[in-house]
């Protein structure tokens, strides 16, 4: 029997792949160093068109997307990425105006940060959206899947299909989760805090505008008249409630 000991092989964990779309060199340099030290592998795109080109080249775990990119805006890049992928997107903006953040969220961004920001905060947000990413989005077996059905709305939970008045509609991941939680608790008022905690996690840094934007988008898809909602209703000062329509 040989006395030689086998050498230990340390396999480095796979680094988290980040697409950084940013045109300010000072931010690029700082993020490449800071995120690299935190275990992220950073690919840089310096304008919107390059961001889309880099996105097609490989799979990324998270996208950091500046709002004000040259050639093609961050909003347009976000819209095009979201049309084909559920990859987590964090928008970065130098503006703190509400309209900017609302537009970003409506285009499918998962979160946003405002410049200047601290690296620790950005990393925490990145890890939060990565934890919330579904680990397996494959369809459930045909012979067993969970369904929530109230009135004219049917949600196939495992398949993540939403059918409204007999037609399939496209709900983004968090919109689907929001509607599912409200339907599961039909007739009960769920506070903003509970909804944010259930959908975005207890470590969410943002404000309640994110929730309001998602509610608005869900209403646009399920309500006959979104301006006068009868199913997804607001309980002022508290939160939201799903009211199942009465049987006809």
Image: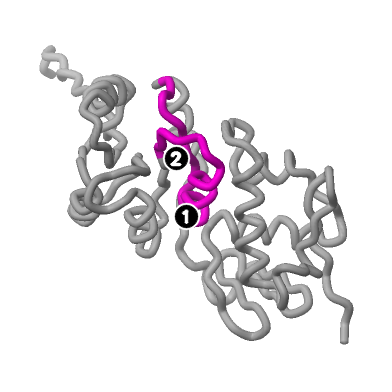
Q: Which residue is mark 1?
A: 108
Residue 228 position by quadrant: bottom right
Left or right: where 171 falls relative to 108: right
Point out the tag, 1 or 2, that comes first from the N-terminus. 1
Q: Does residue 27 appear to the left or right of 9 in the view shown? A: right
Residue drawn at the location 70% of the way across and 69% of the way down: 226
- Toward the top, the furthest residue is 3
Q: Is any atom of residue 68 visible in this view?
A: yes
- Which one is nearer the viewer's eye here, 7 or 69? 69
Identify whether 240 is placed above or below 132: below
Query: Which of the two residues, 206 or 247, is positioned nearer the viewer here?
Result: 206
Asked whether residue 12 appears in the rendered view, the answer is no
Q: Is residue 56 above or below residue 222?
A: above
- At x 27%, y 21%, the residue is 30
Dots 1 and 2: beta carbons under 8 Å? no
Q: Let me know if residue 10 is in the magenta part.
A: no
Q: Horizontal and vertical percent for residue 116?
A: 41, 24
Quadrant in which the N terminus appears: top left
Q: Which type of secondary structure does the marked residue at label 1 adopt?
A: loop
Q: Which residue is mark 2?
A: 130
Label 2 Cα neighbours within 10 Å, binned few <14 / some 14-19 / many ≥20: some
Magenta residues (range): 92-118
Q: Which dot, 1 or 2, sits closer to the camera?
A: 1
State yes or no: residue 104 in magenta: yes
């Amino acid at each position: 029997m040989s006395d030689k000991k086998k050498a230990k092989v340390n396999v480095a964990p796979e680094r988290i792949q980040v697409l950084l779309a940013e045109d300010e060199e000072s931010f690029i340099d700082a993020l490449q160093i800071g995120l690299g030290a935190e275990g992220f592998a950073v690919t840089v795109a310096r304008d919107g068109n390059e961001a889309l080109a880099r996105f097609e080249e490989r799979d990324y775990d998270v996208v950091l997307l500046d709002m004000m990119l040259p050639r093609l805006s961050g909003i347009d890049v976000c819209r095009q990425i979201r049309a084909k992928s559920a990859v987590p997107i964090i928008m970065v903006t130098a503006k703190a105006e509400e309209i900017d953040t609302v537009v970003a969220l409506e285009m499918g961004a998962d979160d946003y940060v405002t410049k200047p920001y601290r690296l620790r905060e950005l990393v925490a947000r990145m890890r939060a959206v990565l934890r919330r990413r579904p680990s397996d989005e494959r369809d459930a077996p045909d012979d067993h899947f969970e369904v929530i059905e109230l009135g004219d709305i049917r949600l196939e939970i495992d398949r993540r299909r939403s059918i409204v008045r007999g037609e399939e509609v496209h709900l983004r991941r968090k919109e689907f989760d929001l509607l599912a939680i409200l339907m599961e608790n039909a007739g009960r008022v769920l506070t903003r805090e509970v909804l944010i905690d259930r959908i975005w996690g207890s470590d969410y840094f943002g404000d309640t505008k994110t929730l309001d934007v998602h509610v608005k988008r869900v209403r646009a898809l399920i309500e006959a008249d979104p301006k006068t909602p009868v199913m997804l209703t607001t309980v002022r000062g508290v939160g939201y409630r799903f009211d199942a329509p009465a049987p006809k």
